Image (cartoon, rainbow, N blue to C red):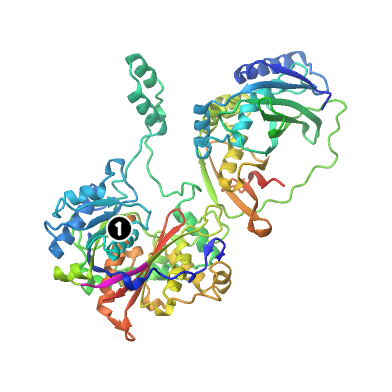
Amino acid sequence: MSVDGQSVPGTHEPAAATQLRKAVVVGGNRIPFARAGGAYTKSSNQDMLTAALDGLIARFGLQEERIGEVAAGAVLKHSRDFNLTREAVLGSALAAETPAYDLQQACATGLETVLGLANKIKLGQIDSAIAGGVDSASDAPIAVSEGLREVLLDLNRAKTVSRKLQVLSRLRPKDLAPDAPNTGEPRTGLSMGEHQALTTAQWKITREAQDELAFNSHRNLAAAYDAGFFDDLLTPYRGLSRDANLRPDTSPEKLATLKPVFGKNLGAEATMTAGNSTPLTDGASTVLLASEEWADAHDLPKLATVVDGEAAAVDFVHGKDGLLMAPVFAVPRLLARHNLTLGDIDFFEIHEAFAGTVLSTLAAWEDEEFCRTRLGLDGALGSVDRSKLNVNGSSLAAGHPFAATGGRIVASLAKMLHARGQVNGRPARGLVSICAAGGQGVVAILEAL
Amino acid sequence: MSDFQTVILGEMPALSKLYVNAAAAAARRRVLGTHGGTELPAYTHEVRGVRADVANLTAYQHLIGETAGDVLPAGFIHALAFPLAMSVMSRDDFPLPLLGMIHLTNKVVQSGPILFTEALDIRARVENLRGHRTGTQLDVVAEVRTAGREALLWRGISTYLAKGVFLPGIDKPSAPVTQPPFSVPDPTALWQLGVDTGRAYAAVSGDFNPIHLSVLTAKALGMRRSLAHGMYLASRALADVGAVKGDSFSWEVAFDAPVFLPARVALDINTVQGDGGAWARSAYVAWNPLSGRRHFSGTVAALD
């Protein structure tokens, strides 16, 4: 059965979950996130990932430990970093016998490393794992132009001097201009912000609602820092001990003064500003995962279990759905598989790529027509209790080093779930939702231990 | 059609030579004030056993945004057949000035996949000389078949306008065709076209029409800046429609305001599903995101 190519939720049962052991989150560590061009300007992805990894190793006493597997990735990745994660492991205090692999799924990279490694632990393939992600918008790889690249490759293939000169003579001055990465979607040429501006307008999300969400993100993150929440989740790096993007003193009034930056050529009013959109950011995060036995044997905490995950993708290319709306489809499928509703979730961690992304997602779940025709539900999925949404701040305040966001969220959520413990006689439950470029999304459920 | 006599050319004519000849003919006409009559030449030009150059094909596919596969894109076949079409229009008995003609519409029916390895028989002719409220228009018909076979695989009909040229005996339509006003939709894509877009397409299509090459060569022909090639734009829209169109489809485009380079072009692709939810067609329209002027529009549709 399918509705618009998206399978109807609840039509298959999870694999015999009783036969699988649990994958638990032991803890996490990240470096504070810096704004692009800030404190980490000269730090490479490998530098930052190693810094986050070393902090994790120090916190949990993993020096010389052979971890089952380490998986991490970066969205903006230099071709020389083909073994980024393995190189970071070799540069860390972990045993050199620790295998590692790179993964890349745009902004869902970090969460997907958690899910993939958790599955390996559940299957008994490994007992311990470190998931992670890193990105640098400052130290971004710059490619040479296609013209120069072709000349260089042909030059390498040319055997004689005369042939080499012939190849070189093809070079033109414009070939020397570099080709920097941009945030445009390859198939549409629209930037992520322009894509979201279309979705934001489609769901009629107001400027005020976006600014309010951004304000809450800063307020919640600042309060979490003040309460010492990040004391065991973060290692200072390059002089930063807090996320550089955090503005504790911002206000809805200040946010209201910012000029729109996206969607200025659309028919609708432009509502997306630098304040309610995430800035380009540098940073890295890691999460330590393990079987219960491994955690117990190492006398380490068990904060939460990684219950399940779901990926979705949407047909955004010709505007059928918004670029960042895939989690709208993934979440109801995941909930249905576990016979849960939005009301059964105690913490919602919805990545704030843009305030408009979060609010469009919530609006879609509240829209009866959309949920019936597009999600195959009987009615609206329901409303998210705003008091349970991103309670310790999210990407609008912390920043969003693409692949590092999943690890940031999973480590923080596991700690919150553990602190909450039981709710109505069952473990506290958290939902993670991360949208990604290419019209993709990955979501997951974690439960307190 | 039986009135057409076939002229078989030994090889694909060189476009550069044709453009030079056209320029010479234009100068001759300016000096002597003669024109080539009021009827279209009743000749079909044919080249047999044409093969696509694979390096050129790859360059074309990368430029247009097609995956470099082994099937020839419909727009690439247009470019492949174009020199032959030009050779008909550069005949001495062709009644209209070739340089400066405006491409109004283009219609292609692709009946099946053509692999780059196939030898092809290509034919071209001109027909349907008729009036236009601003000049005289005609259709250039190109056909592509597997060498030695009768089944038609690709047919293109390009309608060109010789602006300001009025031939005796050809009436212009009395009432101008009024188009409904264009209201700008939300874009599904945004193209950034650099100044070298015209040159880049010339390099892969072989169509070195001076109005696309540079500001100077365009100015020489009365344009204020160089233009993006219409078939480049339409071919990118075709690529953007994607794999859903399959190997056989119709592809139409109507050109409105020219795209002066460099440019930002906004595009909307609207997918229409038929009964049962299968893809029926994709309608596309492109416009200038600042002025809201429409550049071109068209459809890619499943064949009946």
Report whether B155 appears left or right of A213: right
Quarter of the figure with residue B229: top right
Residue nearest the viewer, comparing A432 with A138: A432
A304 falls in the magenta region:
yes
Quarter of the figure with residue B273: bottom right
Q: Position of residue B62 (x, y in %)?
A: 49, 36
SS assignment for the magenta stretch, majority: strand
Please tell me how crowded label 1 is: few (under 14), some (14-19), or many (20+) other residues with Cα within 10 Å: many
A79 falls in the magenta region:
no
The span picked out in magenta is A302-308
Q: Which residue is mark 1?
A: A404
Residue A49 vs B114, above or below: the answer is below
Residue B63 vs A171, above or below: the answer is below
Quarter of the figure with residue A148: top left
Report whether B267 appears left or right of A178: right
Tag 1 secondary structure: helix
Q: Position of residue B28 (x, y in %)?
A: 72, 14
- Residue beneath the point at 41% across and 33% down: A146
Residue nearest the viewer, comparing A122 with A360: A122
Residue A246 at least partly seen: no
Residue nearest the viewer, comparing B261 with A24: A24
Residue A16 vs B96, above or below: the answer is below
